[in-house]
Amino acid sequence: AQSVTQPDIHITVSEGASLELRCNYSYGATPYLFWYVQSPGQGLQLLLKYFSGDTLVQGIKGFEAEFKRSQSSFNLRKPSVHWSDAAEYFCAVGQYGNKLVFGAGTILRVKS
Amino acid sequence: DTAVSQTPKYLVTQMGNDKSIKCEQNLGHDTMYWYKQDSKKFLKIMFSYNNKELIINETVPNRFSPKSPDKAHLNLHINSLELGDSAVYFCASSQVPGNEQYFGPGTRLTVT
């Protein structure tokens, strides 16, 4: 069965520090991969996506993610976190014609 | 220009009532979805329509009934509301199933 694991429920980083949020998936074929961000009381906003090609993808707000097929991972990174990045982050996996499966989310806290 | 909109944003009602949530997208997408996000922020897909045809119908009580009058609209009707229905309901759309989804702002349903 398809599944997405985000091992970290909460992460706290200092403002200006680097960030890496982990995402591992289980999928029968080469999946489409996504990261979304949800600020409190808001809907989900797409940060970036991977369909094929270059395994390092750039997204909005200075985020990037790297697809590693051998590790079934799609980790999200940002070199320098801003206080406004505090939110919940969701990894999702899908395939053309199928539904998306979402991870349980990682709450990011940013301390000044 | 709101891409995916939902009404109402908040809905407070009593057990046993019937209520509807409306969703509209102006992205020209063919596929629309309803998700339920529970108190632990877990996102669970409920339904999906592609070109007004139901393509995903997860294990959801039959008190929930989606209706898609056209490709731009997907409404959710809930009969005989129960306490456990309290959650945030998100509408989303994508060009095709499996591609990136764009989410509405959510409807917070509280059943008392």
Image (tube, coloured by chain):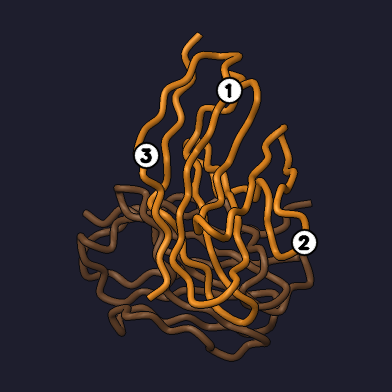
Q: Is residue A29 above or below residue B9?
A: below
Residue sitting at 63 percent across and 84 percent down? Answer: B50
Give the class, few, some or many, for how many residues have Cα within 10 Å of label 3's Cα (few <14, many ≥20). Answer: some
Residue sitting at 36 percent across and 74 percent down? Answer: B78
Residue A57 got which mark? none
- Contact between marks 1 and 3 (CB within 8 A): the answer is no
Label 3 sits on residue: A8
In the rendered image, what is the letter of the chain coloured orange? A
Secondary structure beneath dot 2 equals loop
Q: Mark 2 and mark 1, same subunit?
A: yes
Amino acid at pointer 3 = Asp
Determine whether, in the image, residue B34 is placed left or right of residue B109: right
Amino acid at pointer 2 = Gly
Between residue B28 and residue B70, name the one nearer to us: B28
- Please provide percent x and percent y for residue B47: 47, 78
**Which badge, 1 or 3, is on the more N-terminal residue?**
3
Between residue B67 and residue A47, name the one nearer to us: A47
Can residue B8 be seen from the camera position used here? no
Residue sitting at 42 percent across and 46 percent down? Answer: A105
Query: Which chain is disc 2 placed on?
Result: A
Amino acid at pointer 1 = Ser
**Which badge, 2 or 1, is on the more N-terminal residue?**
1
**Which badge, 2 or 3, is on the more N-terminal residue?**
3
Determine whether, in the image, residue A41 is placed left or right of residue B84: right
Label 2 sits on residue: A53
Question: Could you tell me how far apart the alpha carbons at marks 2 and 1 are, in whole angstroms?
Answer: 25 Å
Secondary structure beneath dot 1 equals loop
Q: Is residue B4 above or below residue B22?
A: above
Query: What is the residue that sits farthest to the front in this orientation?
Result: A70
Residue sitting at 73 percent across and 43 percent down? Answer: A59
Give the class, few, some or many, for how many residues have Cα within 10 Å of label 1's Cα (few <14, many ≥20). Answer: few
